[in-house]
Amino acid sequence: MSNLERFFFNNTLLDGPLPRAYGKWTKIKELQLGSNRLSGSLPVGWFGMTNLEFLYLDDNRFIGTLPSEFRSWAKVFDLRLNRNLLSGSLPVEWSELSALEIFYLGENRLNGTLPSGYSNWSKIRDFRLQENQLEGTLPSEFGRMIDLEDFNLELNRLSGSLPPEFGDWIKITDLRVYGNNLNGSLPSDWSSMTRLEFFYFNQNQITGTLPVQWGRMTSLFTFFGFDNLLEGTLPSLFSQLSNLASVALAINSLTGSIPEQWGNLKDLQLFLLADNRLTGSLPVSISNWTDLWWLGLDTNEMSGTLPSELYVLTNLEVFTISDNGFSGALPESWSSLSNLEVFNLELNRLSGSLPPEFGDWIKITDLRVYGNNLNGSLPSDWSSMTRLEFFYFNQNQITGTLPVQWGRMTSLFTFFGFDNLLEGTLPSLFSQLSNLASVALAINSLTGSIPEQWGNLKDLQLFLLADNRLTGSLPVSISNWTDLWWLGLDTNEMSGTLPSELYVLTNLEVFTISDNGFSGALPESWSSLSNLEVFNLELNRLS
């Protein structure tokens, strides 16, 4: 087989080490053994394959270091060793592989620094070393790799700044350096990367502002820079990035308002700027973002009323603007956002009632409006939210009763409505909420007894109805709540004896029924509640 030029055995379940004898295939041009179970080290003896152009050994189980002897592969232009267990440093000698166009060594265990000599790879188009343990800085000499289209060093341990010299990469389309320890500012010189489509620099320590000049990078499609130390305002000139679909700049220190001009970014699908210091209101112009499916602006300093014009964003699935200073009412027109799955406006200054029209949100799974000044009653029309799992409306001024119709919301898992002005009884039909795990309705004015039927809520883990006006006894049926860890019924008007049957609630950690009218003896059977950490029965009539 000494005259063999091509050898293809990808994805054929080959295992064991690579034969050293293959090193005698001096005419081999293409060797593909990817996606197998091959193991062992890379044979040094393969340096004799001096006509090799393609080598695919990706997705195997190779260990050991990269042989410096492979410097002899002067014709190789496609080298793929990604997804193995290779270790050690990148050989400086490989700087001589000047024909390389594609270099894949990602998802290994390589360490050490990036050899500046690799800048000799003047034909390199695709350079990938992601998910290794590389350290040191990005060599400024790499700026000479002017044919680069893809550059991926994400998830390493690189430090230092982003070299301005990389601005010479005028053909680059995909650049990923996220998940390192890079610092310094974003180079304005990179504005010449006018073909760049995907840029990921998130999870570093990048400082400074967003360069105004980057408004020229009109091919940008994805721009991820979250979890850095960016500051300053959002440049209005970014409104020229007409192809932009995804912006994620959360967890920085950006200030100022969202420029009205950004409404021109009509292809936006994802806009995440949570955990910054943004001010101002929600611009009406973002109603142009009709392809948007995720809008996240939580934990900023924004204010003003909520624009009714956003009713046109009918593709929205996730809409979160919690922990700001928004005020005024919830726009009824937003009932058109029928694809919403997550809606979070908690910790604002919103007032007014919960619009019955929101009952059209039949896909909603997570709805949070707690910590506002909302009033009015709970709309019975919301019973159509049959996919709702998490509902937090606590710490408002909600009045009225718990709608009987909500017994149809059978996906409910968490139901938090404490610290409101609710009254009336606990609907027996809520016993149909078979997925319910957490109920917190403390600090209201609820009356009547705990329905016996609620014993059917067998997945309950937390049940807090303290500080109400509940009467009646502890139902024996709650002994079905065997997953319960917190039972809190303090400061009500309950009475009767304590059911010995509750001895089965062995997961209970907190059991507080103080300030009621319970009487009789403490059941000896409760000795089985061996996980109890807090037990409070003070201010009762126990004997």
Image (tube, rainbow, N blue to C red):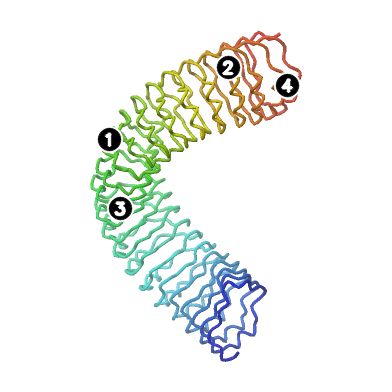
| Residue 246 marker | none
Query: What's the amino acid at mark 1?
Result: Ser
Residue 526's tag is 4
Which comes before the other along the chain, label 3 or label 4? Answer: 3
Cα gap from disc 3 to disc 1, whole angstroms: 21 Å
Q: Is mark 1 on a helix, strand or loop?
A: helix
Q: What residue type is labelled 4?
A: Trp
Q: Name the residue under label 2.
A: 490
Q: Which of 358 and 49 is in front in this view?
A: 358
Task: Name the N-terminal-most of marks 2 and 3.
Answer: 3
> What x and y, as percent, mark residue 384?
43, 32
Residue at 35%, 61% in the rendered image = 197
* Mark 2: few/some/many CA within 10 Å (<14, 14-19, 20+): many
Q: What residue type is labelled 2?
A: Asp
Going from the N terminus, do you reach mark 1 or mark 4 first? Answer: 1
Secondary structure beneath label 4? helix
Q: Mark 1 points at which residue?
A: 308
Residue 255 in the image, given as x and y percentages of width and height: 32, 43
